[in-house]
């Protein structure tokens, strides 16, 4: 099984988080705040946080190897 680098996974999580933010903003503009919007915001928060953490891990490992 091939392992994915933390940088690639971090970028993927950040894109996914951005997509959830986009969906939440669009739904708020159409329907106002509902429970579903809070779920989207929560998912976006977790994804962006995980993405940033993975990208930081990548750069820390890269710096420690040099």
Image (tube, rainbow, N blue to C red):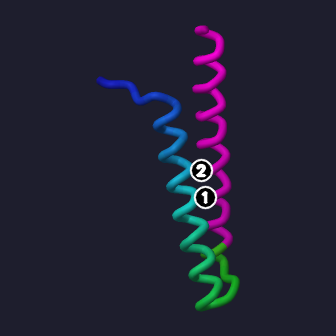
- The residue sitting at 67% across, 55% down in the picture is 45
| Number of numbered discs | 2
Magenta residues, as a range?
38-66
- The residue sitting at 51% across, 44% down in the picture is 11
The disc at residue 47 is 2
Relative height, residue 63 to residue 22 (above, below) = above
The CA distance from mark 2 to mark 1 is 6 Å
Query: Percent x, y for residue 37?
Result: 64, 75
Q: Quadrant of the C terminus?
A: top right
Query: Percent x, y for residue 35?
Result: 66, 77
- The residue sitting at 70% across, 83% down in the picture is 33
Residue farthest toward the left in the current orientation of the protein: 1
For the residue pair 27 and 36, the one nearer the viewer reads as 27
Q: Is residue 61 left or right of residue 33?
A: left
Query: Any magenta on residue 50?
Result: yes
Residue farthest toward the top in the current orientation of the protein: 66
Query: Percent x, y for residue 36?
Result: 60, 75
Relative height, residue 47 to residue 43 (above, below) = above
Q: Quadrant of the N terminus?
A: top left
What residue does disc 1 label? Answer: 43
Tag 2 and tag 1, C-beta contact below 8 Å: yes
Query: Percent x, y for residue 8?
Result: 46, 37
For the residue pair 32 and 48, the one nearer the viewer reads as 48
Identify the element where label 1 is drawn. Answer: helix
Identify the element where label 2 is drawn. Answer: helix
């Amino acid at each position: 099984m091939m392992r994915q680098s933390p940088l690639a996974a971090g970028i993927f999580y950040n894109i996914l988080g951005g997509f959830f933010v986009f969906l939440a903003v669009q739904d708020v503009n159409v329907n106002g705040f509902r429970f579903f919007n809070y779920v989207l915001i929560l998912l976006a928060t977790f994804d962006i946080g995980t993405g940033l953490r993975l990208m930081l891990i990548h750069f820390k490992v890269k710096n420690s190897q040099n």
